[in-house]
Image (tube, rainbow, N blue to C red):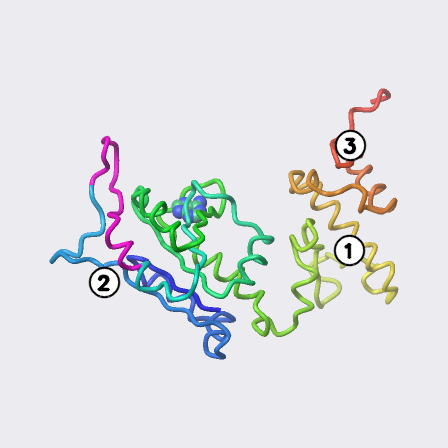
Amino acid sequence: MRIDVVSIFPEYLAALELSLIGKARQDGLLDLTVHNLREFTADRHRTVDDTPYGGGAGMVMKPEPWAQALESVRQDARPVLIVPSPAGAVFTQAMAHELAREEHLVFACGRYEGIDERVLEWAEGSFDVRPLSLGDYVLNGGEVAVLAIVEAVARLLPGVVGNPESLVEESHSDGLLEYPVYTKPSSWRGLDIPEVLLSGNHARIARFRRDEQLRRTASRRPDLLAKLDAGKLTPADLAVLAAEGYTVVHGRMAPAPPSSDS
Ligand code: ADE
């Protein structure tokens, strides 16, 4: 996979030289280049921003440096252009899997109040443009989002994570949060690990883990629980969720109405 990142703070992206992503680059699995937007300006001050038409606070990124930068990185047919923004669609694990199948990703890191909207319109001609948000909060620019999205995508590329098994049983892989994990010692500061994990009974351990996934998702992320297809849950799953206060309504899990005796 090839990735190009355009930013006015290329140093911010130095973290992409570390750990698994750095190793993937060294191993030739990922060809990642960071470009400084200021290299694509034509004036002495290397200006990238200006005041907004219509007034208002802050500065807006000028369109022409962006067009120059994006034209310089586009080589193949129609790369995906990711524009991190709190006004984008929320990035998910499903999107990470989708993006991991692409050949070329380009990231445009906005700063200030954002990039002149015409850049996105113009880019539609030669890129598959995707404004993406990390979540419902505001960062100062797209760089942190690029670090997060590149890491989520690159770890799914074949060969990047040593044991691909570890990608299967993790949070969000099946719409549920991950089960809790424990390591030695089995008793630590008065806290013992769940006894079932010492039983050697693989079926019981699998059931315990599944129950924990369901309980955690119900208590921490009821929004995820509501998206599950109840038809794919087993009677044992439904019993755990009933104990958490959930019932099936129109094929989905929903909070059970209060019972008449409570
Ligand atoms: N830039 C500023 N805020 C952001 C967010 N929440 N997600 C992605 N990019 C951003």
Q: Earlier in the sequence, mark 1 or mark 3?
A: 1
| Distance from the alpha carbon under mark 1 to that under mark 3 | 27 Å
- On the image, numbered disc 3 is attached to which residue? 250
Residue 254 x, y percent position in the rendering? 74, 33
Task: Identify the mark at residue 209; answer none if there is no mark.
Answer: 1
Question: Which residue is pictured at 43% across the width and 57% down the height?
Answer: 146
Instruction: Please name whichever residue, 176 or 179, is drawn nearer the observer in this view of the structure.
Output: 176
Label 2: state its secondary structure. helix
Which region of the structure is painted magenta? 51-69
Q: Amino acid at mark 1?
A: Arg
Q: Is residue 99 above or below residue 253?
A: below
Residue 52 x, y percent position in the rendering? 23, 37
Graded by Cα atoms within 10 Å as few (under 14), some (14 to 19) or many (20 or more), the crowding at tag 3 reads: few
| Distance from the alpha carbon under mark 2 to that under mark 1 | 52 Å
Residue 95 x, y percent position in the rendering? 56, 53
Q: Earlier in the sequence, mark 2 or mark 3?
A: 2
User: From the viewer's perspective, is 207 left or right of 133?
Assistant: right
Q: Quadrant of the C terminus?
A: top right
- On the image, numbered disc 2 is attached to which residue? 39
Q: Single out the residue that lies furthest toward the left.
A: 44
Q: Amino acid at mark 3?
A: His
Q: Amino acid at mark 2?
A: Glu
Closer to the eye: label 1 or 3: 3
